[in-house]
Image (tube, helix red, strand yellow):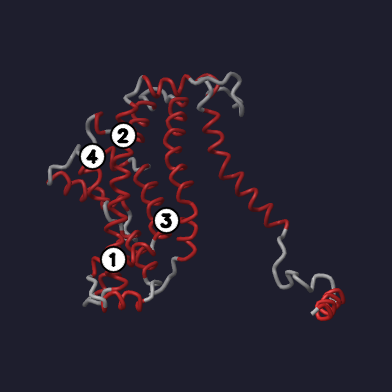
Amino acid sequence: MTAALDAATREVARRPRGAAGSHIGEPRPRAWLYVVLGLGLVLVVTPFVWMALGALKTEGELRANPPTWLPREATWDNFRELFTRLDFPQFFANSVGVALAVTLGNLLFCSMLGYAFAKIDFWGRRWLFRLVLATLMIPGMVTLVPLFVLVSNLGMVNTYWGLILPFLAGPFGVFLMRQFMLGIPDELIDAARVDGAGELRIFARVVMPLCKPALATLAILTFLASWNNFLWALVVASTEDMYTLPVALALYSVGQNSTRYGLLLAGAVVVVVPVLLVFLALQRHFVQGLATTGLKS
């Protein structure tokens, strides 16, 4: 045994440097790639840093020419006015409630539709799915007026139902869940059917636990879109108690004669924070979902 170990050690020692335990064939990191990524990071982060620093400046300093990067005298007056003068808790609660309801609705209904398109064989499935994909090509501005007329005829103007119901299932979410579920082995679902499980039980007990990456991706994208939704909330909400945070900030910080940039930047910081928290909580599943969602037909 000792002789064999000595022979193996001598063999390793005679190999060229980098042969044993080396990374031959693996691409070496290139300096220019890190430079490009670093510049991209700076371009992405700079507006957020400017926004956060601007929220700590006075209105006069924000309007100064040339502009300053760091505040001369940091002040919390903009945030203080945001939380005291405006009905901030009501606006924040409206935004959170609408965004969570829309996100949960998409997670449920888009998953159901994706499962039906991916794993249930029925007549016209391909054509119906193509129709869903076709709706992705229609701009939202085209459907804004017909959708408002429909909501108005249903008596949902200036209600939470009017803010939530039109967005409970989106075509992109259906496409995302369907593509992910195509990667789930059919044998697994067939085995559950042989054991006597119904489609709802298979969907809840077998398919959904395997879709965590796709669900996290859909949750982040849906929450972000609903949280930042401005135009629809502006059209449907007609009283202050129904305003969401983006609408309230736009109406109270932008006047007829001037714009309160400090108040607007402070509100933008508050709007961004929940989205960052959601992304940080689900980023691992988000990256995995983007990496594993295929483009199967």
Q: Which residue is labeled 2 in the image? A: 93
Secondary element type, mark 1: helix
Q: Nearer the viewer, residue 245 or 258?
A: 245
Work out whether mark 2 precedes mark 4 in sequence or the reverse, and give the earlier one: 2
**Label 2 Cα crowd, 10 Å radius (few <14 / some 14-19 / many 20+):** some
Kindly identify the amino acid type of the residue bearing the numbered disc 2.
Ala
Secondary element type, mark 3: helix
Image spot of residue 2 (x, y percent): 82, 77
Res. 240 image quadrant:
top left
Secondary element type, mark 2: helix
Work out whether 108 lies above or below 188: above
- Give the side of residue 13 with respect to residue 288, left or right: right
Which mark's residue is nearer the viewer, 2 or 4? 2
Mark-to-mark CA distance, 1 and 2: 32 Å
Image spot of residue 163 (x, y percent): 25, 43
Q: Which residue is labeled 1 in the image? A: 203
**Label 4 Cα crowd, 10 Å radius (few <14 / some 14-19 / many 20+):** many
Which mark's residue is nearer the viewer, 3 or 1? 1
Mark-to-mark CA distance, 2 and 4: 17 Å
Q: Which residue is labeled 3 in the image? A: 217
Q: Which residue is labeled 4 in the image? A: 236
Work out whether mark 3 precedes mark 4 in sequence or the reverse, and give the earlier one: 3
Kindly identify the amino acid type of the residue bearing the numbered disc 1.
Phe
